[in-house]
Amino acid sequence: MSERETWATRAGFILAAVGSAVGLGNIWQFPFKTAQFGGASFLVVYLIAVFGIGLPAILAEFVIGRRAKLNAVSAFGNLGYRQWRFVGALGLFTGFWILSYYSVVGGWVIRYIWGSATGAYFTDSAAYFGAVSAGLDAVALHAVFMFLCIFIVALGIEDGIEKATKVMVPSIVVILLGLAAYGTTLSGAGAGYDYFLSPDFGALMSNIGDIVPFAVGQAFFSLSLGMGAMITYASYIDGEDSLVADGSTIVVLNTFVGVLAGFVVFPLLFAQGIDPNTSGPGAVFVSIAGAFANIPAGRAVGVVFFLVVLIAALSSAISLLEVVTSYIIDNYDVGRAPTATAIGVGLFLLGLPSAFDTAWLGWFDTLAYQLLLPVSVLLVLVFVGWILGGEALSEVMKGSSLGDGFGTTWLWMVRVVVILAVLGTLALGIQTLFLGSEPAIVPPL
Ligand code: PFF
C-alpha cells in the first residue's frame, strides 16, 4: 500500500479544519439563534460553551487522530482498543448521514446563485423556494454539489483538500467582510445590529434550561465534532506542533465567522423590514432572498452572498466525504478517486428522499442533531477521558509550552464537565425527539 498522505503545512491543516467547521451552521443557524436567544447575553453563554466545552472536545478528537495516524474507525484499533472501533463507526455513519442531506441544501445554494443572477425569485421568494427545494431540480443540483465534493476529495489531501481550503477559507472571510461593509450602508443596518446583539437577559433567563444545552450542541455541530471529521483531519498531521494552539485558532476563527455572518444577514433583512423570526428548513432562504429583491444592486449582492454560503458548505462537506474515503483507502487496496466517487454515489442515493421532500430532510437532520451527534461525541469523550487517559494527556501536551497543570485540567474537563454537558444536550435531544416537546433546538438550516 502506498504511503499515507499528510498535510504539506501546519497552516494547511488549520485551514482545512476551519473549512470543515465553518459551514451552514455558522451562516444560517448561529446568527438567528443568537438574536432569538438574547443577543449579546446568549453570545456570552455560547463563548463559554465553545471555549469551555467545544475546545476540550475538539482536542480530544485531535488526540485520537494524530496519535493513531489512521482513519476515524481504524484509529481506535491502532491505539490498542479494537473493541472501541464501533465509536469511530458511529461517527463515520453520522457524518455520512449528515452529508446526504447537507448536499441537498448545497444544491439549493447553487440554485440560488443562479436565481440571484437572473432575479428569478424576486417576485415571490416563498413560491420560488417551494418550486426549487424539492423534486427533480433539487435532485440534479444535489448531484452537482456532490460532484464538486468528489472532485476535490479525489485529488487528495495535499493537492485536493489542502489546496482548495487554502483558497476557500480566506475567501469566506474576505467576502463576508465585504458584505458586512456593504451592510453598513443599508438603511436598516442599525436596527439589524440591534436585533442581533442587543442584550436581552430576560429572553436568556426565561429559557435558560433549553438555551444552555442548545449552546453546547451548537458548539459541537459547528466544530464538526462527532462526525469523524476532526479525527480524520488530525490523522494527516505530520509534525508535533501544539494541538492546543491549533485547536484554539480553529475555535476562534469559527466563532469569528459566525459573528461576522450576523453582521451580514441582519442589515440585509432589516433593510426590508423582513421578520427574521421565522423557522423551519428553508425559512432563511425565503427571507434572505426576499431582501435581495429590493436592495440596491440586489442581484450582484445575492450572487456574492450565496457564493460565500456555497464555499462554506463545500469546505465542510469535503471533510465528511474524506472521513469515509480515508476509512476505505486505509483498509483496502483501492484508489482514492474511485473510492471517493463510489461513496459520493452512495451519498447521492441516500440524499434522494431529502431532495424529493423537505419533510424528509427535516427528519434526517433532526435525528442527526438530536441523537446521533450527541451520542457519538459522548462516546469519543468517554474513550479519550477514561480509556486513553494519560496517553491522551501526553499527546495533547506535545509541542505545547503550557504547563502540566493545563493538561491535567483538560483531562478532567473532558472526563467530567464536557461529558456532563453532552449528557445535557442529549437529554434535551431525546426529549424533543421522543416526547414531542417543543423543539428548542431547531434544525440547523
Ligand atoms: N461545522 C459544520 C457546519 O457548521 O455547518 C458542520 C458540518 C455539517 C460539517 C455538514 C460538514 C458537513 F458536511
Image (cartoon, rainbow, N blue to C red):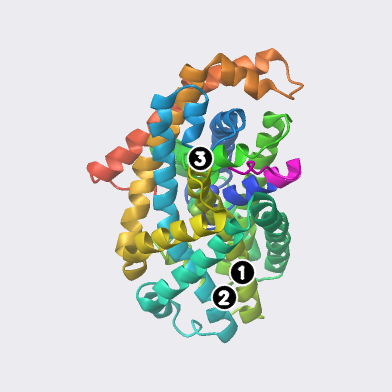
Which residue is denoted by mark 2 in the rendering? 113
Callout 3: few (<14), some (14-19), or many (20+) C-alpha neighbours within 10 Å? Answer: many
Residue wearing tag 3: 225
Whether residue 275 is visible, yes or no, is no
The image quadrant where one finds the C terminus is bottom left
Residue 179 % position (x, y): 68, 66
- Mark 3: is the Cβ under 8 angstroms from ligand 1? no
Image position, residue 73 (x, y; %): 46, 36
User: Residue at image x 41%, y 78%?
Assistant: 137
The magenta stretch is 1-14
Q: CA distance from mark 1 to mark 2?
A: 6 Å
- Which is nearer the N-term, disc 1 or disc 2? 2
Q: Residues within 10 Å of mark 1 (few under 14, many from 20)?
A: some
Amino acid type at circle 2 is: Ile
Query: What's the amino acid at mark 1?
Result: Leu
89 is within the stretch colored magenta: no
Q: Mark 1 sits on what residue? A: 307
Q: Marks 2/3: CA distance?
A: 29 Å
Residue 5 belongs to magenta span: yes
| Secondary structure, magenta segment, majority class | loop
Q: Nearer the viewer, mark 2 or mark 3?
A: 3
Tell me the element at label 2.
Answer: helix
**Are the residues flagged by discs 1 and 2 in contact, CB closer than 8 Å?**
yes
Which residue occupies the foreground of this view, 339 or 300? 339
- Label 2 Cα neighbours within 10 Å, binned few <14 / some 14-19 / many ≥20: many
Query: How many marks can you see?
Result: 3
Q: Which mark, residue 284?
A: none
Residue 130 image position (x, y, % from top left):
37, 75
**Front one among 108 and 49:** 108
Residue type (three-letter) at the residue carrying disc 3:
Leu
**The one of 424 and 160 positioned closer to us in this rendering:** 160
